[in-house]
């Protein structure tokens, strides 16, 4: 039987489930890290976490940044990373080809097996990264260890090395995370890493996690977010789901979250969401932002702005730039006329954002 719910109910649920009600006190309690908080552009993961915590985090100690879903940098609970690596590990040659995403001619030149390419590069990465290393040093060392057919000539650095996509793809299964605590990014081995996944396990659970935070959604939506082969995902699609119709669009949703969906709380008055925020990662963008012009302004090919979320609706975009060392300038670009009583909340959230970024002052324009 199909459950029918309104758009407002789904958005309210997602806002609450992702922690934007700001009832969580620490990163360790932030459940949305199970899905992953993307760090694109750099620094946005910290802003997304701060938007959800009752106190501004002084650092991101505890969680680990890895190249996870879609080989993009995401912040996760460290304990979840072995399971994430196993879930993303391809179960078949077709799945490996999807993850690797090489042209057929290049794959043929490397022996024709995407799985073999991934395994060889993963082993090389694991052997190389035994302590904190710069990305350039790791790339050079890994490239020397793999067959030349896995590398290509780079005009920029005038040498042969593995591609950026392959480099990112194999870092997590090799047990490597991105550590920027010192100010510069270092590739660092994860403590007590069990080794590369021997088989693909847990993909259904990972899909359920996506549906928990960004459902209802289709198989295609879920595969697109995870960056996995849609046919493989369909074959291992979770069984404990219900079909939910949202104003005429059907999708799947975890059965054990239906009660929470039905009683979704009122959304917070206002939040400033950074580019790449989990709330903006849903594939049903028309549901989140019905206006086509606003969608075009928010989701660009390059340089996405942040979003102003007010009373459950995205009402504006925002951009910030430094004006010297002490002051941050925040520009808000409304998609329509903003309620005048939002001013105080905007100023408060802008001050919070400036503090997270290390500025003493903020100016709203």
Image (cartoon, rainbow, N blue to C red):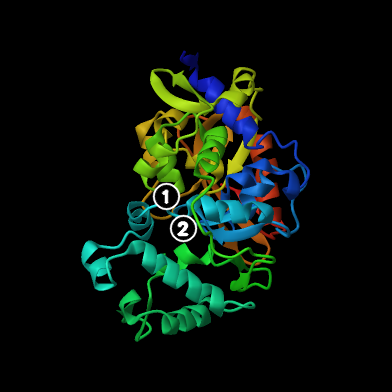
Q: Is residue 62 above or below residue 123?
A: above
Left-right relation of 85 to 92: right
Q: Are marks 1 and 2 in contact (CB under 8 Å)?
A: yes
Give the residue at x 32% y 52%: 94
Q: Callout 1 environment at 10 Å: few (<14), some (14 to 19), or many (20+)?
A: some
**x, y percent for residue 2:** 46, 15
Please give the residue where the numbered disc 2 appears in the rendered image: 71
The label number, if any, that marks residue 162 in the structure image: none
Give the residue at x 36% y 42%: 230
Left-right relation of 3 to 231: right
Element carrying mark 1 = loop
Q: Callout 2 environment at 10 Å: few (<14), some (14 to 19), or many (20+)?
A: many
Q: In this rendering, does residue 95 appear at all?
A: yes
Measure the C-alpha gap from mark 1 to mark 2.
8 Å
Give the residue at x 51% y 58%: 41
First in sequence: mark 1 or mark 2?
Answer: 2
Q: In this rendering, does residue 339 appear at all?
A: no
Give the residue at x 44% y 28%: 287
Q: Is residue 152 above or below residue 277?
A: below
**x, y percent for residue 54:** 76, 42
- Write down the quadrant of residue 265 in the picture: top right
Element carrying mark 2 = helix
Direction left: furthest residue: 105
Left-right relation of 244 to 20: left
In the image shown, does 65 or 107 lie closer to the viewer?
107
In the image shown, does 101 or 154 lie closer to the viewer?
101
**x, y percent for residue 202:** 54, 45
Q: Is residue 337 above or below residue 43?
A: above
Please give the residue where the numbered disc 1 appears in the rendered image: 227
């Amino acid at each position: 039987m199909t459950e029918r719910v309104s758009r407002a109910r789904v958005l309210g649920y997602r806002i609450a489930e992702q922690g934007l009600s700001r009832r969580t006190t620490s990163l360790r309690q932030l459940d949305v890290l199970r899905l992953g908080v993307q760090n694109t552009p750099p620094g946005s993961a910290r802003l997304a976490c701060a938007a959800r915590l009752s106190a501004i985090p002084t650092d991101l100690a505890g969680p680990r940044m890895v190249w996870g879903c879609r080989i993009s940098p995401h912040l996760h609970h460290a304990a979840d990373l072995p399971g994430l690596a196993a879930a993303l590990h391809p179960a078949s040659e077709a799945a490996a080809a999807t993850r690797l995403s090489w042209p057929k001619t290049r794959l043929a030149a490397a022996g024709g097996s995407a799985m073999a390419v991934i395994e060889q590069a993963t082993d090389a990465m694991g052997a190389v990264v035994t302590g904190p290393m710069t990305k350039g040093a790791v790339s050079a060392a890994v490239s020397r260890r793999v067959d030349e057919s896995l590398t290509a000539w780079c005009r920029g650095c005038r040498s042969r090395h593995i591609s950026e996509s392959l480099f990112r793809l194999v870092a997590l299964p090799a047990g490597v995370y991105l550590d920027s605590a010192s100010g510069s990014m270092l590739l660092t081995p994860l403590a007590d890493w069990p080794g590369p996944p021997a088989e693909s396990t847990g993909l259904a659970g990972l899909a359920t996690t996506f549906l928990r935070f960004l459902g209802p959604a289709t198989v295609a939506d879920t595969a697109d977010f995870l960056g996995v082969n849609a046919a493989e995902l369909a074959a291992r699609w979770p069984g404990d789901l219900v079909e939910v119709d949202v104003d005429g669009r059907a999708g799947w949703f975890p059965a054990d979250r239906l009660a929470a969906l039905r009683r979704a709380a009122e959304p917070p008055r206002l939040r400033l969401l950074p580019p790449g925020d989990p709330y903006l990662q849903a594939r049903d963008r028309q549901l989140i932002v019905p206006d086509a012009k606003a969608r075009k302004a928010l989701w660009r090919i390059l340089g996405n702005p942040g979003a102003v979320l007010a009373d459950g609706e995205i009402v504006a975009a925002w951009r910030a730039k430094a004006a010297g060392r002490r002051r941050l300038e925040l520009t808000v670009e409304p998609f329509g006329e903003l309620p005048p009583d939002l001013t105080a909340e905007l100023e408060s959230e802008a001050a919070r954002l400036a503090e997270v970024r290390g500025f003493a002052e903020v100016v709203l324009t």
